[in-house]
Image (cartoon, rainbow, N blue to C red):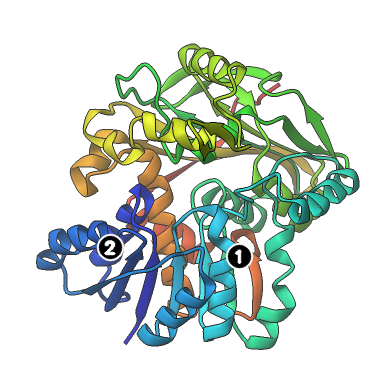
Amino acid sequence: MSRLLIIGCGGVASVAVHKCCQNSEVFEEIMIASRTVSKCDALKEKLQPQTRTKITTAQVDADNTDELTALIRSYQPDAVLNVALPYQDLTIMDACLAAGTHYIDTANYEAENTDDPGWRAVYEERCKRLGFTAYFDYSWQWAYRERYEKAGLTALLGTGFDPGVTSVFTAYAAKHYFDEIHTIDILDCNGGDHGYPFATNFNPEINLREVSAPGSYWEDGKWVEVPPMSIHREYEFAGVGKKDMYLLHHEEIEALARNIPGVKRIRFFMTFGQSYLTHMKCLENVGMLSTAPVTFQGRQIVPIQFLKELLPDPASLGPRTVGKTNIGCIFTGIKEGREKKLYIYNICDHQECYREVQSQAVSYTTGVPAMIGAMLVLTGKWKKPGVFTTDEFDPDPYMDALNRWGLPWTVEEDPELVP
């Protein structure tokens, strides 16, 4: 009997829970645990009559390793799926080690307090050594590799869409279409319209920190960092149309640069409308994107956390968002001595997602891969001791599962390249 502990109960977690409940053959029992147990109870009440999966709930503080360890030992799951915040990756990994349980997440570790002196010292050394200044990177979690190996446990990192599916697309292209991959362009297009003047499609604090940071890409064996939003391209996306997109730093670049032999360049682009960029720049200029605490009326507040409370909850965007997403990878390289170009992508419709699981497509495209990663670990198809990203396993079962569970993909030969 397989049992999964799911930590978190936001928009992505809700999709992952829905999909686990659709897949009762694998997920016979699940527990939903969050700081706000009432959210878990409401989701259980909604889904339990519709599924054979047995659902239980619990309250837990994901910042507290002892609490997490006690919960894992009490419930005894076969694996833990972390769909909480990236800030909490390390405490949950520590708890999984202590309790002897496999670990799965959707995004790499990011420090909540970037002014902490201990974290800052490690961060600044990494900036000098590697050449990029993003607050998130894999080094903190890769440092767990030997401990997970010795414990005989699997830690699967970044099984969302990007990172996650985009890395599986790369492994699939390398296995079936290329002898050598030379360039990878990861394109993330959200053509959805929610009707608000300004909102973010996932956690505002994480989203705005990512977008306002310097961009970077991998080229000729090193990082190249550029000012935020300084590299702009246009691209015609199937199902969406022509969109403006901007180069960002993104975590899968770091893993793919390490794991794909001979790759010469990796870039990540995300689409943004002008209204979003104008709002974001204004908020940045007045200090609302700052992570440094300020004193307001005798209390310490973090501006970006306060802003998060003012913006629409991403989980509430589903019923009002229309349009589609298109996320995929364009590859160039060599096959049998000849130059080759290939594009693998998924198109996802916001309203179809809402009809199925009451979510917009951004949460759907992360929550479905979270379930798939957990399924592959639980069934043993992706299970080996250590810490791994999704490009380090056989991509075929994951690609098959995407088609089955709601994220069908398209392979396009000879696509338009991004200059």
Q: Which of the two discs, 2 and 1, sits closer to the camera?
A: 2
Q: Residue at x 30, y 35 (%)?
A: 350
Q: Residue at x 74, y 78 (%)?
A: 146
Give percent across and percent down for residue 34: 36, 62
Image quarter for residue 224?
Answer: top right
Q: Amino acid at mark 1?
A: Leu
Above-or-below relation of 79 to 41: below
The residue under label 2 is 37
Give percent across and percent down for residue 258: 78, 55
Q: Residue furthest left?
A: 49
Above-or-below relation of 101 to 120: below
Q: Amino acid at mark 2?
A: Val
Above-or-below relation of 66 to 250: below
> In this view of the protein, which residue sits in the foreground, 204 or 303?
303
Answer left or right for 131 relative to 275: right
The residue under label 1 is 90
Q: Residue at x 65, y 48 (%)?
A: 252
Specify the label residue 376 is tagged with: none
Give percent across and percent down for residue 341: 66, 36
Quick one: quadrant of the C terminus?
A: top right
Give percent across and percent down for residue 162: 54, 45
Secondary structure found at label 1: helix
Q: Residues within 10 Å of mark 2 (few under 14, many from 20)?
A: some
The answer to whether residue 372 of the structure is visible from this angle is: yes
Give me the C-alpha separation between circle 2 and circle 1: 22 Å
Secondary structure found at label 2: helix
The answer to whether residue 383 of the structure is visible from this angle is: no
Answer left or right for 320 relative to 151: left
